[in-house]
């Protein structure tokens, strides 16, 4: 039996939130596959979100999840701290840069607020989705960002946590139980890509970095951009001292960005306030908003 439109509406009306990885994702996929899929052969489908249509390959579990429960999936992103920051900074013709885009759902929502978007995603299956829907996402690039240019290995995670693919080998080495493949990918610096894409740096309004342990190398590849007087705020997923890879990047990224006037901030209950990565206890994985106080205080509504 095919998945009827009313089922998508019914699932969406429940209000529960899901993500592209984790146990809740697996349970929903298993239930919907059992009820609504009559063949294991790859199929194509499309869904409409707002004014935009996404083309999906249902052989990919992450895209199939988007097919089954788009409203639930996007509600989780809409209720996130990052989307609150995106909404504060939204401006026509401004650019949201999504480094480590995955399925580009933050970029999709940024487009709803008026942003133009630039997405970087080296994982082949995720990039295939982004490129297939390039009219929705503006500009997509199949490249990993780091502190050098060339080609390197990329560790592709399994279906259970499809967002953990990385340039950084997991602690303890690569394991087929967690990672399904190692593929060569193009790698470049942010500075080199700005030149290659002929993008006006002053048009960038917000940068998101989610690169699973490679965050220090990524910001080091932004040095020329960071020196400019219009460098944008950076929302970056970082690692604390107990992380298995990119260990304590919260400190190393903060230290590097401080050279360019950036300070770390945390978003909590609608308030953006300073964060001390040297004194405050740090989780294993968490997000930091890096901003130049004098430059970004008003648009971000920074608190002191």
Image: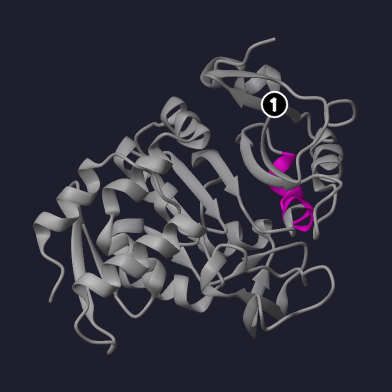
Residue 302 seen from this side: yes
**Residue name at image x 71 percent, y 80 percent:** 153
Q: Residue at x 28, y 53 (%)?
A: 70
Q: Identify the residue position indicated by label 1 in the image.
A: 265
For the point 74% across and 29% down, the residue is 264
Q: Nearer the viewer, residue 265 or 151?
A: 265
Q: Residue furthest bottom?
A: 41
Is residue 150 placed above or below 29 in the rendered structure? below
Q: Going by the image, does 58 lie left or right of 232?
A: left
Vertical order, 166 against 174 (above or below):
above
Left or right: residue 275 versus residue 267 is right
Q: Is residue 209 above or below residue 179?
A: above
Observer-nearest of 200 and 183 = 183
Q: Which corner quadrant holds the N terminus? A: bottom left
Q: Position of residue 26 (x, y in %)?
A: 44, 64
Q: Which residues are magenta?
A: 216-227
Q: Is residue 226 magenta?
A: yes
Residue in view at x 74 percent, y 56 percent: 221
């Amino acid at each position: 039996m095919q998945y009827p439109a009313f089922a998508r509406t019914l699932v969406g009306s429940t209000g529960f939130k899901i993500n592209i990885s984790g146990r809740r994702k697996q349970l929903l996929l298993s239930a919907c596959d059992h009820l609504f899929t009559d063949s294991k052969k790859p199929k194509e489908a499309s869904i409409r979100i707002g004014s935009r249509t996404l083309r999906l390959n249902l052989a990919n579990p992450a895209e199939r999840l988007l097919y089954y429960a788009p409203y639930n999936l996007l509600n989780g992103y809409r209720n996130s701290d990052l989307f609150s920051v995106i909404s504060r900074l939204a401006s026509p013709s401004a650019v949201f840069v999504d480094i480590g885009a995955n399925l580009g759902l933050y970029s999709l929502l940024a487009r709803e607020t008026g942003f133009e978007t630039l997405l970087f995603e080296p994982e082949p299956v995720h990039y295939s989705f982004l490129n297939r829907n390039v009219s929705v996402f503006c500009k997509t690039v199949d490249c990993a960002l780091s502190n050098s240019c060339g080609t390197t290995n990329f560790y592709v995670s399994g279906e259970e946590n499809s967002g953990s693919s990385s340039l950084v080998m997991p602690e303890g080495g690569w394991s087929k139980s967690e990672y399904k493949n190692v593929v060569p990918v193009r790698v470049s610096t942010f500075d080199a890509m700005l030149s290659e894409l002929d993008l006006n740096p002053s048009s960038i309004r917000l940068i998101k970095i989610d690169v699973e342990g490679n965050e220090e190398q990524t910001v080091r590849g932004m040095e020329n951009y960071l020196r400019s007087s219009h460098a944008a705020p950076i929302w970056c997923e970082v690692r604390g001292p107990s992380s298995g890879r990119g260990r304590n990047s919260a400190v190393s990224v903060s230290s590097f960005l401080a050279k360019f006037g950036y300070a770390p901030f945390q978003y909590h209950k609608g308030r953006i306030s300073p964060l001390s990565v040297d004194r405050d206890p740090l989780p294993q994985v968490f997000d930091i908003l890096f901003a130049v106080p004098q430059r970004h205080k008003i648009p971000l509504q920074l608190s002191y």
